[in-house]
Image: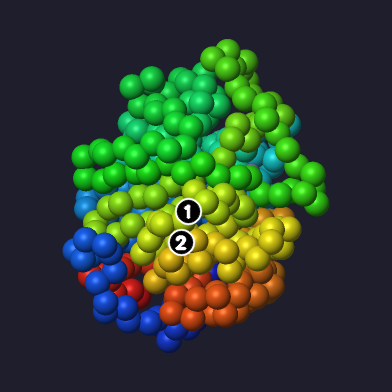
């Protein structure tokens, strides 16, 4: 059994020691308020600020840790979404998420979109994603009123926040041979098979909320020219070893985004189901250790905060709190 609580307690102390106080005003507006980040696993995040809850690629069904669940329960959850006909673990979703105002989807692969219909229908959240994302969600009963299809380049003002949509690229899978130009049109046949979860194009998002600018990624690639001139305070960066397929990944990413003050790695937990704390620590060390060094070299003033699943990271007035 995993002693998650004990382990989380130890990590909390380590995190406290790591935390750097960022006293400078962090945003262009200089009015940095409160913002909280909760890593949901895979490329999923819950971001809370100004009374709003913004979800990014929420994939609770893929959670491998937390909630003191037994190995048998986790195996069952995994077998649901790994099946030929993936289904979300709605009980687990309901346990973790209760509210959402916005759901941002980077692309339509199963580990980014599977849980979105259930969450959207239950919360009434506005969903932003590609045309393929929109069509897949609409087919599954998400009301049109909640759906915003985008292509990249939009910069939308909503009540309490604005969201800029940035064209991007998917991870260079299969030794740089991955390419998928398929899109879903309005007619999407149900039930969805695993093969129906096509990429449908890839996006990034710049979220301006609570006096912060947060740039999100759901893959290990980006279009450099689309990022140039952006000055996010916080970068949620795609970080698996597949970034090594990309030329000077970390250097170029940080240079193009003006060396954000805070960098949080995402989508790094792609190994098969973690079975124990040792495997979890090994993954963190193997994947995140080199990335931390890359950031230290590329942008010494940037601070990397290593997220722990379901452990909120609070930032208040530009200061990281435990
Ligand atoms: Zn993908």
Residue 257 — which label? 2
Percent position (x, y) of residue 115?
51, 37
Say which residue appears at 22% left-offset and 50% top-offset: 51
- Tell me the SS state at disc 1: helix
Crowding at mark 1 (Cα within 10 Å: few <14, some 14-19, many 20+):
many
Asked whether disc 2 touches disc 1, contact meaning CB atoms under 8 Å apart, the reply is yes
**N-terminal-most mark, 2 or 1:** 1
Residue 295 — which label? none
Say which residue appears at 48% left-offset and 53% top-offset: 227
Q: Is residue 83 left or right of residue 47?
A: right
Q: Is 51 placed above or below 31 here?
A: above
Crowding at mark 2 (Cα within 10 Å: few <14, some 14-19, many 20+):
many
Say which residue appears at 55% left-offset and 54% top-offset: 224
- Colour scheme of the rendered structure: rainbow
Q: Where is mark 1, residue-wise?
A: 227
Q: Is residue 266 left or right of residue 83?
A: left
Residue toward you, 296 or 20: 296
Q: Is residue 282 left or right of residue 126?
A: right
- Tell me the SS state at disc 2: loop
Q: Quadrant of residue 193?
A: top right
- In three-dimensional space, the C-alpha distance between marks 2 and 1, rounded to whole angstroms, equals 6 Å
Percent position (x, y) of residue 205?
43, 47
Percent position (x, y) of residue 173?
74, 48
- State the residue lying farthest toward the left: 31
């Amino acid at each position: 059994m995993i002693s998650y609580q004990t382990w989380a307690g130890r990590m909390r102390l380590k995190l406290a020691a790591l935390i750097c106080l960022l006293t400078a005003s962090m945003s262009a507006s200089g009015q940095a308020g409160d913002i909280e980040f909760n890593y949901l696993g895979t490329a999923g995040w819950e971001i809370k600020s100004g009374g709003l809850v913004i979800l990014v690629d929420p994939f609770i069904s893929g959670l491998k840790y937390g909630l003191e669940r037994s190995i048998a329960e986790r195996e069952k959850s995994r077998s649901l979404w790994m099946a030929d006909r993936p289904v979300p673990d709605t009980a687990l979703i309901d346990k973790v998420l209760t509210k959402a105002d916005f759901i941002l989807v980077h692309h339509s692969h199963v580990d980014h979109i599977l849980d979105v219909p259930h969450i959207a229908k239950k919360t009434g959240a506005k969903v932003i994603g590609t045309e393929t994302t929109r069509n897949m969600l609409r087919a599954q009963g998400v009301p049109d009123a909640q759906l915003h299809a985008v292509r990249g380049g939009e910069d939308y003002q909503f009540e309490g926040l604005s969201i800029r949509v940035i064209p991007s690229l998917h991870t260079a899978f299969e030794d740089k041979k991955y390419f998928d130009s398929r899109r879903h049109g309005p007619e999407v046949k149900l039930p969805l098979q695993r093969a129906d979860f096509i990429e449908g194009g890839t996006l990034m998002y710049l979220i301006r909320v609570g006096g912060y600018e947060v740039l999100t990624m759901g893959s290990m690639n980006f279009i450099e020219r689309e990022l140039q001139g952006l000055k996010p305070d916080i970068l949620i960066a795609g970080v698996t070893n597949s970034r090594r397929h990309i030329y000077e990944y970390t250097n170029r990413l940080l240079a193009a985004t003006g060396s954000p003050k805070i960098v949080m790695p995402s989508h790094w937990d792609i190994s098969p189901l973690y079975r124990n704390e040792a495997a979890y620590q090994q993954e963190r060390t193997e994947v995140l250790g080199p990335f931390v060094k890359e950031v230290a070299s590329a942008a010494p003033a940037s601070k990397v905060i290593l997220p722990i699943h379901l452990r909120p990271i609070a930032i208040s007035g530009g200061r990281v709190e435990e």
